[in-house]
Image: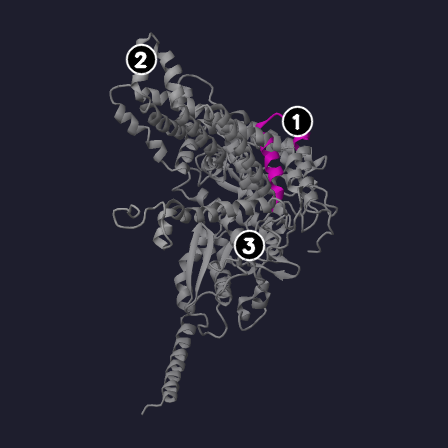
Amino acid sequence: MGLPTSRDGLAPASRGGRSVRGFIDRRFLAVVSWPSLLIMLLVTAVPFVFTIGLAFTNYNLVATAWKFTGFENFSRLFHDPQTGTILFNTVYLVVGTTVLDTVFGLGLAVLLDTKIRGAGFIRSLYLLPIMTAPIVVALTWRAMFNNQAGWIDYFLSLVHLPQPVWLGTPSLAMPAVIISDMWTGVPFQALLLLAGLLNVPKELKEAAASDGANRLQVFWHITLPSLRPVLFVAVVLRLIESYRKFEGIQILTTGGPGIASTPLNLNIYNTGLEYQQVGYAAAMGVVLVIMIAISVALVYLLLGRRS
Amino acid sequence: MDHPFRRRYAAAAVLAAGAILLAGCSSSGSSSGSTSSSGSKPYAGQSLTVETYTAVPEFDFYKSLLPQFEAQTGIKVNWVEQPVDTQDTKIPLQLKAKDTGLDVFFTGSENITSYIGSNGVQSLDSYINNPKDTPASYNFKDFAPDIEAACQQNGKTYCIATHTGGALLYYNTAMFKAAGITAPPQTPAELLTDAKKLTTSQHAGFCVRGDKSQTLYDAFQLWNWFIPWNNPVTGTYFNKNWQFLIGQQPYASQFATFYRTLLKNYAPKGIATYLVTNCLSDFQQGRVAMWQDDSGTIPSVLDPNQSKVANDTAFWAMPCPPVNPDHCELVQPFGIWMNNASLHKGAAWQLIQFITSKQTQLAAVKAKDLLTPSRESVLDDKDAIAALPNTFAAQLKYILAHPDVTLLPFIPEAVSLIPPISNGLSDLITTNTPVAQIMATMTSGENTIMKQAGYPKPFPSS
């Protein structure tokens, strides 16, 4: 008796054969993933390696000649008196947006998971901010924060509260950026977390409830642990998005007043493109990548591993 | 049988006849601007891409003349207008990348050193000095020498100044009258006193761009009243020993205290976020009594359809103080440049000549789309002067007699010097950090950048 064959008469995939078709059969996943891998390599890995190389040069947009300068750019970065403030702003922005977006997003998701009237309509409504172009969002918030004609100060004036200069006060500029980010960040987190919530087995919740657990206990001991894998993904996505946040800050505050709302990301843009010091900006880019890697590792330790 | 050579001769004869006819048409049809001396269309069929700024009347005017240029030369022009940020970020990248898709562009002359450093711009001397490319009627020497000098380095010309620019004080005469002020301020101290008198619940006394992204431009105009101008290469920024003058005492404290007092007390609330459009809007709406800025926005202020104060506006150039008697007025020439990587340099020069010709400048001034022409003969033209706003012409003469064109020093690292200054200026108006500390931080930032760039170097000769 011969070897069993597949229905079309070819040799089974496990054995393949020496033909091209056999090779494709055996390596199907590898073959179909090659084009996208190649594109990824070209648009991500190559520039990334190139950036690392640039970080060790004095390359700029002004002079035609450049040379390797070793760790000079990194040394300059760590001796720059502004670096501390910029790193603090980066952490402030990332932690602020990630925590607030996730906490409020989770609250919204829980609300939408309950059977309330008009839940479908609300779900559609909160998708609107996500669908709006980030530049439009930033311009709208800039107008709303305007201390002469903006709605926010107008409403504050109606209730006789102080009307601060949101974007022109160092201590308020970054909170203003975070608030504007929440408008799109919260619905995005809610969307992801709602998908997770809908997958939490109802039987488990019902069993806990029948054992006498109250709603908070059910949420804390059943829902949240079940949600952990989705929560991990949502937090990591938000974290990376916060590190990348650019147009919102550039349009709202341009990183000011002074450098009060300048995170590392914006500083890289300014240094590399506005002030044309590409090598120095590349060194900052390397530091940013390291910061992102450490943050993702921390989130993994907190949420991912246990899930 | 028809011989192939005969056919070629016949075709050549037809082409030659056509060329002669076309040449005749083009020379008779020329009414404005300079083109090549031959009168033929040597670059016909070529396409040029020009990049410039959006919403600037002067550039819109040039754009309106393009059909005439295209008919005259047979050169097609793709005229691209883009926002300030886009243009300022894109051009250096295109030059560095040797982008052949760009032929001609407009931008401020303060970028000259970085453009030359990246070998991005074409020297124009070979075209200017070649009678085949440039007819005598173009008269390059007509450009105001102090202004055109901003387009030149090491004896070479890299751009042609299209306008001089000029910074001045816009002031509301009705508000001055109501406050009992009879004349515009003669000194910074008087400006402070006037700003105080003019600050009421209805309007602020004074406005400048306070937003970090634009603050350097207006602050430069104010520190020129406090800091001695040193030389044409580094202006008020550095002396010839590369010491940062803006941070030197007593100038640093005098300027910074003036700036902080003026903006914290007499400027609109939220001045730290003010862009040029905010000051313009406040002035137009009568919410601000004085505003120091570039002359480019004069048409918007004098247009009664846009401005409530069109009939109450006058202009003033603050007289140069003793500390800086000859170079206190910011003049920021705008230039038209040729990309070194352009594949159509001959055609590009034709367009540059056309746009910077006397006829074009004169027409732009008369159309009220150009306020500060760069050609001396245009400034001397009575009709052109008559087309300028009433109080502006006299001030412009004073400005051009006391020019400082070094908005940024003419060194390759100029642009990288901006952050410590703009951050310091922003800190002055948004924090209570002592003035001396802010100016020391600013100085330290500049010193680090200069040290990193290998300074002190031999001081440039020009």
Where does label 2 land, which residue? Answer: A207
Inspect the image, locate mark 2, and give the three-letter code of the amino acid beneath it: Ala
Q: Chain of mark 2?
A: A
Q: Chain of mark 1?
A: B
Any part of residue B169 in sight: no
Query: Which residue is at a point 30% across and 14% down the rendered structure image?
Result: A206
Position of residue A250 relative to residue B339, above or below, is above
Q: Position of residue B128 (x, y in %)?
A: 57, 67
Q: Residue furthest front?
A: A1
Position of residue B241 relative to residue B117, above or below, is above
Question: Which is nearer the eye, B357 or B303?
Answer: B357
Q: Secondary structure at mark 2?
A: helix
Question: Which is nearer the eye, B297 or B133?
Answer: B133
Which of labels 2 and 1 is toward the front?
Answer: 2
Q: Position of residue A213 (x, y in %)?
A: 35, 9
Q: Secondary structure at mark 3?
A: helix
Q: Position of residue B368 (x, y in %)?
A: 45, 52
Inspect the image, locate mark 1, and give the three-letter code of the amino acid beneath it: Pro
First reached walking from the N terminus: tag 3 or tag 1: 3
Where does label 1 land, which residue? Answer: B434
Inspect the image, locate mark 3, and give the three-letter code of the amino acid beneath it: Lys
Distance between the alpha carbons at the discs numbered 2 and 3: 68 Å
Q: Which mark, by number, is residue B96?
A: 3
| Quarter of the image that includes the C terminus of chain A | top left
Position of residue A288 relative to residue A39, above or below, is above
Magenta range: B415-438
Q: Position of residue B335 (x, y in %)?
A: 54, 55
- Are labels 2 and 3 assigned to the same chain? no
